[in-house]
Amino acid sequence: MRITQGCFSFLPDLTDEQISRQVQYCLENGWAVNIEFTDDPHPRNNFWEMWGLPMFDLRDAAGVMMELNQCRKVYGDRYIRLSAFDSSHGWESVRLSFIVNRPKEEPGFRLERHEVAGRNIRYTTKSYAADRPEGRRYG
Amino acid sequence: MPPNELTTRSIPANRRTPPQESDMNMHSMTVRGKDRYKSGVLEYKKMGYWEPDYEPKDTDIIALFRVTPQDGVDPIEASAAVAGESSTATWTVVWTDRLTAAEKYRAKCFRVDPVPNSPGQYFAYIAYDLDLFEPGSIANLSASIIGNVFGFKPLKALRLEDMRLPVAYVKTFQGPATGIVVERERMDKFGRPLLGATVKPKLGLSGRNYGRVVYEALKGGLDFTKDDENINSQPFMHWRERFLYCMEAVNKAQAATGEIKGTYLNVTAGTMEDMYERAEFAKELGSVIIMIDLVIGYTAIQSMAKWARRNDMILHLHRAGHSTYTRQRSHGVSFRVIAKWMRLAGVDHIHAGTVVGKLEGDPATTRGYYDICREDYNPMRLEHGVFFDQHWASLNKLMPVASGGIHAGQMHQLLDHLGEDVILQFGGGTIGHPMGIQAGATANRVALEAMILARNEGRDYLHEGPEILAKAAETCTPLKSALEVWKDVTFNYESTDMPDYVPTPSVAM
C-alpha cells in the first residue's frame, strides 16, 4: 500500500528539484519549514520526531535540502515529511505538509474490529510495522 | 464605527449617485415634544425613523435594505417605515412609547440612495441600537430585522442586502464549533482544498449499498463523503443503518490509506431530541463530523453548534432551502447575510457556491460570500457586494463548500475562484466516473494535487490548467478518462444576482 498522508501523495514521488520548489514557496510566504520523521505513521500520530527545530529566518531552500539529505542519511528507511508553519495571527499552524521519503515497503494498517453491544463495532487501526520496537520497524 | 465613516468611506465619492430626493428629505422631519404623541396616524419619517443626521455608533447594528416602494410611495417614507416596522413602530401613535427611552429604541434610517441602474429601487441604511437584541441569538436578531417588515403593504419588494455586526455583538456568539484551522489539524490535511462527494443516488440506497459508495470514494482519495440534505431516516434506509455502515466504510478506508477520513452523517430530524440522539450515536461510533440542514431553523442550528463544540465534532451545514429567499435580487435576504448569521451561529462548513458549477453564483458575489466565511476582517468591497467593513474579532473561520456540477477538468478554475480553504465536492464527478467510484475519486485527487504543486511552483496555473491536467493524466488513467468524459461540460447561464457596483478606475491621488 501507499500511505496517502500529506499534500502530494497521489503524485509520483517528488524529485529533489520539485521538493526544493515547494520549500521555496513556503519560505517566500514567510513560513518556517520543519523536517519530521517517523516509523509509526498511524493516521493519528501527529507528533513525528523533529529533525532539529523549524528553520526560522531562512531565505534559500538549499538550507532545507541540505538538512533533508542529512536526515535521509540517518533515517532513510522511515517516513520523512516537510511541514511549513505560519505564525501569522488567525492561523498559527501548519500551512503545507508533504511526505518526501518513504520506506521501501509500506505494509500499511490492519483494521481491528471489536464487536460490542447491538450492531456496534469499535474500530482500531494498527500499523503492521509498529508491532516491532521503534527503530526496527522498516528494513 | 467612528462618526461619518460610513458616509465618507463606505461609498467612495466616485461611485456615489447624486441624490435625487428633495432637499427637504435631507433633514430630520421628526416631530418632537407633545405633538409627536398626539393620537392618530403620523408618517414614519416624522416619527423619528428617518434621521439623516444620525451618526451610527460603533455598537450599532446596521442593516442595508433594498427597498422597492409601491408606485407613488416616497422612498424616504418607505425606508423610514422599514426602520419603524423592524423596530418599535406600529401603524399608529401609541402613548405607551412615552414610558420608554423610545428615541434609543427606534431604528434610524440615516441614508437612502437610489440603486444604480435600477429605477424604483433604493438602498436604505438603517441603524439599530445594540440593546434591541438579545445577546447570542440569531432567532432574536432575525425576528426583528426580517420579522414583520417583508410583508408590509406600501412596499412592492424588500431585500436585506447586508449587515454590519458590531464587535460588541459578534462577541456574544460562540462562532464555528471547530473552525478551519482546527479542522485541518484534526484531519491532518494542509495546503490544499479538501475533497468530498455527496453519495448518489440521494434516495433509495440501502444502508449497505450506501456504505459501499462511501468506502469506494474515500479509499479512492477523497477526504469526505456526504449525506444529501434529504437523507434522514426513510423506509429504504433508517438512520442507524446508515451510520453503522458508513462508519465501517470510513474506518476501512482510513486503514487502507493511512489518512483521516470522514463522512458527514446528517442528523437532521423532526425534533431536537431526535437530532441529539443521532448526534450522540455518531459520536459513539467515532465520526469526526456530523451535518445539519438550514431548514431546521436558527435556534436548532445554534443548539447543534454548541453540542458540536462540547463533543469535538465538526459541524457541516447544508443550505437546503436558501434559494427560496436568497436568489431574487429584489426580494428576500441575500446569502451574504445568511453566511454572516451562520458564522455567528457556529457551523463549520457552509455551501457557498462554485461559480463554475450547475447552481447560481456570479463570481464577484461568490467571492464576497467566501470572504465573509474565511477572513477575520472584511473591508467594504462594493464590487463583491460587501457593503460594510466587518470585524470578526477572531471568531473561528467557516469553511466554504463548493458543490454542484463540478468536475476534475475545472480544477484550475476552481482553485483560482475559490482558493485553498474550501471543500470541493464532486458528487456526480466522482460517482459517475466510467471506471468506477474509486477511479473517480483518484482522478479528482490527482488533478487537485497536480494543480497545487504547479501553483506553488509559481506557474500560471489558470492559463496552463488544461496542460497541467493533461500532463498529470499521463501517469493517471482515471484522470485521463475523467477529462475525456466531462471535457465539454460547463454551465454558462446569466446570474440572477450580481453586485450593483462595478469597479471603476480611480484617479491616482
Image (spheres, helix red, strand yellow):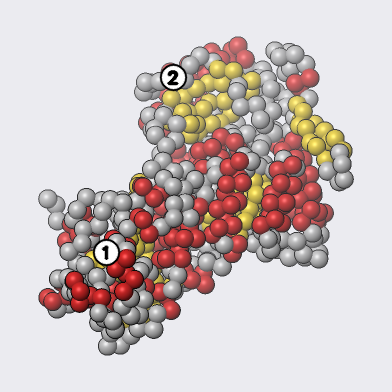
Specify the amino acid type for callout 1: Glu
Specify the amino acid type for callout 2: Met
Residue B441 seen in this snapshot: no
Residue beneath the point at 40% across and 80% down: B152
Camera-nearest label, 2 or 1: 1
User: Which residue is at the front of the view, B188 or B476?
Assistant: B188
- Numbered disc 2: secondary structure: loop
What is the x, y in percent for residue B187? 60, 38
Left/right of residue B499 with respect to residue A62 in the rendered view: left
Q: Residues within 10 Å of mark 1 (few under 14, many from 20)?
A: some
User: Which residue is at the front of the view, B244 or B269?
Assistant: B269
Residue beneath the point at 44% across and 55% down: B134
Residue B15 seen in this snapshot: yes
Q: Is residue A16 above or below residue A95?
A: above
Q: Residues within 10 Å of mark 2 (few under 14, many from 20)?
A: some
Left/right of residue B137 with respect to residue B266 in the rendered view: left
What is the x, y in percent for residue B351? 53, 57
Q: Which residue is mark 2?
A: A55
Disc 1 chain ID: B
What is the x, y in percent for residue B297? 57, 62
Residue beneath the point at 34% across and 51% down: B166
Residue beneath the point at 25% across and 75% down: B37
Q: Which residue is mark 1?
A: B103
Left/right of residue A65 with respect to residue A130 in the rendered view: left
Q: Residue furthest bottom?
A: B72
Q: Is residue B365 above or below residue B452?
A: below
What is the x, y in percent for residue A46? 61, 27
